[in-house]
Image (cartoon, rainbow, N blue to C red):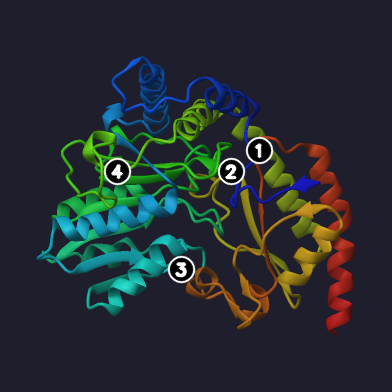
Amino acid sequence: MIYLDNNATTRMAPTVIEAMADRISMHYGNPSSTHQAGYEPRKLVANARRSVADLLGARDPGEIVFTSCGSESDNWAILGALEAFPDKRHIVTTRVEHEAVRKLCEKLEGKGYALTWLDVDEKGTLDLDQLRNSLTRETAIVSVMMANNETGVLFPVAEIAEIVKANSDALFHVDGVNAAGKVPIDLKNTEIDLFSVSAHKFHGPKGIGALYIREGVDIPPLLIGGGQESGKRAGTEAVHQIVGLGEAAKFASDFSKMKFVRRLRDKLEEGIISSIPDTSLNGTAEETRRLPNTSNLSFENTNGEMILYRLDEAGICVSTGSACNSGSHTASPVLQAMNIPYSKAMGSIRFSLGRFNDEAEIDVVLGKLPEMIESLRAMAA
């Protein structure tokens, strides 16, 4: 199997698996217990918190709170900000957010909150003047992703944070789920208040994430119960999952491997575009404004789901990047927001590489894909 869907989830690193297995069998105590069985688990949780803080460039490990996933972190950040500022009923976000943010904001809009939906251009780039002009004294939170999960386009979140703080009293939340472990992050040198991550996006386990809450920012808990996580999130800590997140954070902190991933991505992208007519990149080609592992390509006048099935039959795993909804036959909100024509959007495929891919796999894809596309276009003609 050739796995090129790393923006959906990643293979766990061997060091992560080893660390988790040892902790499941040996350190089963509750980290909140005051007896000796709780001491080692408590120490393991603290070490993992420090590793996540290092990956994100946080000033203090205490700014990291463990959650169950990126979606919980996103929901907590937004709902927590609204509860912290009950007199403010304005939210700013973008039209290309992950469903964990977009669908929550749509629900809140239906409940009477005022929403400003920031637009993107055909390259997926935000209009920062629109952001600046949308901010008011009523704005409670601005939520903007760092890296788009479908196109890999990076938003200038440090600059956005400065704009938010200069023009409002709002909290600024960043969905960093698809950025962490792929590009360096240095939160201590930004004005970002809240930052979401999920372990399974950078070679850790599913079911564990974190929310960075900048020191001095106070949002109420989403989960109510015991006093775990310094009273910020109730629920007995899943020690083995947290250890897995910490080990994944250490593994992903070495970004030297991402240079090789970028080279593979470029070879795949350039090879496809040069060998298959009527193929185009969705998003920007500027290296400083995109993830090193992601390529979203449109194969005009084909169907993305059919391409996916053909590749799957050949043992190659990719994604439509939510480009197609097989029930409604509509393009994804991300590609619609970018004004990608329907004939291209419906033939869109996301290739997302990871640290365990190699050049031989890229050669296989480049050898098989042109014939598949030619065959599918012939069927549709």
Amino acid marked by disc 2: Pro
Say if mark 2 contacts mark 1, CB within 8 Å.
yes
Residue 308 sits above or below residue 20 on the image: below
Q: Is residue 112 left or right of residue 186?
A: left
Tell me: residue 70, above or below residue 79: above
In the structure shown, which secondary structural element does the residue marked by tag 3 occupy? loop
Residue position marked by numbered label 4 in the rendering = 234
Local crowd size for mark 2, using a 10 Å CA cut-off: few (<14), some (14–19), many (≥20): many
Q: Which of the two labelled residues, at mark 3 and mark 2, occupies the earlier sequence position?
A: 3
Disc 3 crowd rating (10 Å Cα; few below 14, some 14-19, many 20+) is few
The residue depicted at 52 percent of the width and 75 percent of the height is 336
Reading the chain from its start, which is encountered first: label 3 or label 1?
A: 3
Q: Position of residue 347 (x, y in %)?
A: 70, 72
Q: Which residue is mark 1?
A: 261
Query: What's the CA distance linking mark 4 and mark 1?
Result: 38 Å
Q: Amino acid at mark 1?
A: Val
The numbered dot on residue 121 is 3
Give the label, 4 or 1, closer to the camera.
Answer: 4
Q: Which residue is mark 2?
A: 292
Pick the quarter of the image with the C terminus.
bottom right
- The amino acid beneath tag 3 is Asp
CA–CA distance between discs 2 and 1?
7 Å
Decide which of tag 4 and tag 1 comes sooner along the chain: 4
* Disc 3 to disc 1: CB gap under 8 Å: no
Look at the image and tell me whether residue 127 can be seen.
yes
**Front residue of this view, candidates 235 and 258:** 235
